Amino acid sequence: MSKNIFKGSVVLNPVPVVMVTSRNNEGKDNVFTVAWTGTVCTKPPMLSISIRPERLSYEYIKESMEFTINLPTRKLTRETDFCGVRSGRVVDKISEMKFTMKEGKEVSSPYIDECPVNIECKVKSIIPLGTHDLFLAEVLCSHIDEKLIDENGKIHFEWANLITYSHGEYFPVPKTAIGSFGYSVAKQATIERKKAIAKTNSSTKKKKDKIKEKTKKKGRK
């Protein structure tokens, strides 16, 4: 395998696509996109986002020390991109994109109802790094679309049609897994059992979706 050398460039790709909502001390709301986010701790549950100081949301979040991460679906790709390239200083992105905003449970910042997953966060520390400052935050609670949760309480993020960002482009997340944690050392019987459960869950979801669609059609008549 022949490789080229690139010095001093972070080429970690793909990364999650998230929209971050915040509210300043005057009650004004804003939304912008963040490509650099990640889990940093389990107990307490914490994550991080990196923000340029010149961004409007930087001001809002630094004031309130709170924010909410919203995971967009494939259908929201255009809206997500718009919120990343337009500034809240010149356009009301929330109104322009016609987002349905809901009040947070543990923080003052609202969340985008159209996004199936919303994560409420409280900033614990801000670390200046250079072009970006790192915001370390504790996760206080999350809102999960009930359609992503099966009968056993497992969250199926693969049902959410989430998207990723890679080197300037958006890509859909596959719905089918190519492996699971620990499968490389698991017994074949365990692997087959997990596959059967996944197949059953997928079939159950399809049936539920069909029933909901039929109900919607009846309602339109």
Image: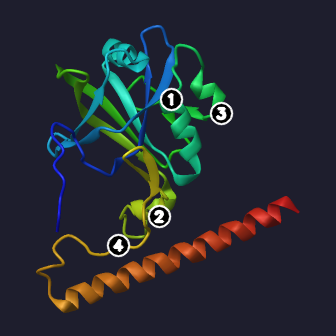
Badge number at residue 98: 3
Instruction: Give the side of residue 90 with respect to residue 98, left or right.
Output: left
Instruction: Give the side of residue 159 with respect to residue 131, left or right.
Output: right
Helix, strand or loop under label 3: loop
Nearer the N terminus, badge 4 or badge 2?
A: 2
Mark 2 in CB contact with mark 3 (< 8 angstroms): no
Query: What colour scheme governs how the chains and residues are painted in the rendered image of this protein?
Result: rainbow
Closer mark to the observer between disc 4 and disc 2: 4
Badge number at residue 159: 2
Q: Residue 175: x, y in percent? A: 44, 69
Q: Residue at x 39, y 15 (%)?
A: 60
In the image, 172 versus 18, the foreground residue is 172
Closer mark to the observer between disc 1 and disc 3: 1
Q: CA distance from mark 2 to mark 1?
A: 28 Å
Badge number at residue 102: none
Nearer the N terminus, badge 4 or badge 1?
A: 1
The amino acid type found where label 1 is placed reads Val
Q: CA distance from mark 4 to mark 2?
A: 11 Å
Q: CA distance from mark 1 to mark 3?
A: 17 Å
Q: CA distance from mark 2 to mark 3?
A: 24 Å
The amino acid type found where label 4 is placed reads Ala
Nearer the N terminus, badge 1 or badge 3?
A: 1
Nearer the N terminus, badge 3 or badge 4?
A: 3
Helix, strand or loop under label 4: loop
Q: Is residue 106 visible?
A: no
Helix, strand or loop under label 1: helix
Q: Mark 3 packing: few (<14 Cα in 10 Å), some, or many (20+)?
A: few
User: Which residue is tagged 1?
Assistant: 85
